[in-house]
Amino acid sequence: MHITLKNIIAVALLCGISSFVFINTAAANTEKDTKGTESLAPEASAGEAKLSFRDIPDLKEAFIDTTPADRKDGIPVGKLGGDGRNKGTIVKLAQEIAESKHGNYDSLLIAHKGKLLFESYYLRGRINLAHPQASATKAYTSLALGRAIQMGYLTMIDLDKPLISFLKDLDRTKLVEGAEKITLHKALTMHGGLSVDREKWKEIEKNSGQLQGQGLIQTLLENSGPITEDSQIYKYGNHNPMLVMTVIDAVVPGTAKDFIKNEILDKLGITNYSWDTHVSGLPQAGWMVKMTSRDMLKLGSMVLNKGNWNGEQLISSNYLAKATRGIVKPTIDWMPATYRYGYFWYQTPITIDDKSYNVTFAWGGGDQRIIVIDELDLTIVITGHDREEKLMDQILNAVLPVFAK
């Protein structure tokens, strides 16, 4: 078993804080990974990669690294505390996560000023394992729409046009009253206004042939109640993400699946992922995507840089400015009162030493988050399988102040 100098320093640092937390020395050796780079973080075996996420065995020891390895994956790396900032509170939080004091979490990554400075894995987390994203997928669908706008297939003005105007295969004579009131803006803010009986829809889904492509929207708008001002209230989910995905598929060359792969994921070097297919045959828009923590960080860094990646403008900066703005207030009782919703992205303010910062984030159940704080040039990724989802408060209280000074 090899224990590098970096391991020893990290262990010593952790010992000085509280109880002992091991760096994962069983996986943290100097063997080369499949890309020929030095791999220190725990990796899933080929067999583990084929398992369902629930069957992934927990790590025996948490892996906590304040000097992440350069894996030649397009992510620059640095050293936490290399600029003189006190990293103690962050390492202490990592230790607490390792001890499951804040719930069941699988990774925490922090990038500042374009460099990954902190990387950690716990429980089912592995550096090479694509993690279920749940509703964070909605934010990725939003980015795909922003890419279509950047490439000229849609415009910002189109966001307020009737959504059905982009779907040429619809038979408008059969649509419910008010169908034209649904716009991309309404769908992206969960205000589409559909009212389809859930039990009836379950029966409709059994005949998936009628739901292929734009048939999905045709069927929804034939079976919904009228679209009115009263029906167009905030209602999370409610087919809104698939409304958006169907428009993407209609306006881009080829298919939405190929567009997402070729125009976003490939350009970011994201290859280790899965993106399931909806009953319509289109890519899932609201869930059923898996992605590694490092690749989540790439998406966050692109958002932080206003849609730019390595000098290429991938996502419309005007679209992102609106998408990450707090446009509406989610009407969900358990959600923090300060949370606002943009285009499938959340936003909340936080105050540190009497100064307010805007926190933008993608959010999926189990606590998958890509957190972006523009004023601090900071991107944070967390993944988990936790019901309470309370780590966000700890992140805001322990991590952000380190970079606000």
Image: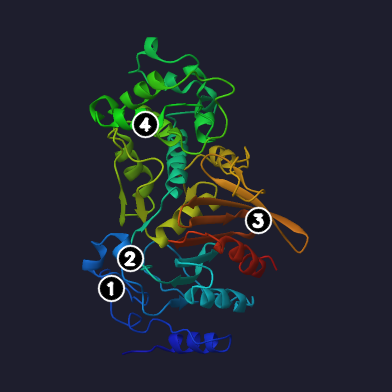
Q: Residue at x 59, y 21 (%)?
A: 229
Kindly identify which residue carries mark 3: 375
Dot 4: what SS?
Answer: helix
Please tell me the numbered disc located at residue 128.
2
Residue farthest to the top, as pictured = 173
The amino acid pointed to by label 4 is Glu
Residue 86 coordinates in the image, percent (x, y): 64, 77
Dot 2 or dot 1, earlier in sequence = 1
> Which coloring applies here?
rainbow
The amino acid pointed to by label 2 is Asn
Real-space Cα distance between discs 2 and 1? 10 Å
Instruction: Find residue 199 and report its image quarter.
Output: top left
- Residue 236, compared with residue 209, is above or below; it is below
Horizontal placement of 149 versus 206: left or right? Answer: right
Q: Residue at x 52, y 28 (%)?
A: 159
Number of marks in picture: 4
Kindly indicate whether the residue at mark 2 contacts the one at mark 3 (C-beta within 8 angstroms).
no
Residue 333 coordinates in the image, percent (x, y): 61, 45
Real-space Cα distance between discs 4 and 1? 49 Å
Dot 2: what SS?
Answer: loop
Q: Residues within 10 Å of mark 4 (few under 14, many from 20)?
A: few
Q: Residue at x 50, y 56 (%)?
A: 369
Along the line of sight, which residue is nearer the eye, 231 or 165? 231
Choose mark 3 or mark 2, whichever is in front.
2
Q: Residues within 10 Å of mark 3 (few under 14, many from 20)?
A: few
Horizontal placement of 401 versus 96: left or right? Answer: right
Dot 3 or dot 2, earlier in sequence = 2
The amino acid pointed to by label 3 is Glu
Kindly indicate whether the residue at mark 1 contacts the one at mark 2 (C-beta within 8 angstroms).
yes
The amino acid pointed to by label 1 is Asp
Kindly identify which residue carries mark 1: 33
Choose mark 2 or mark 1, whichever is in front.
2
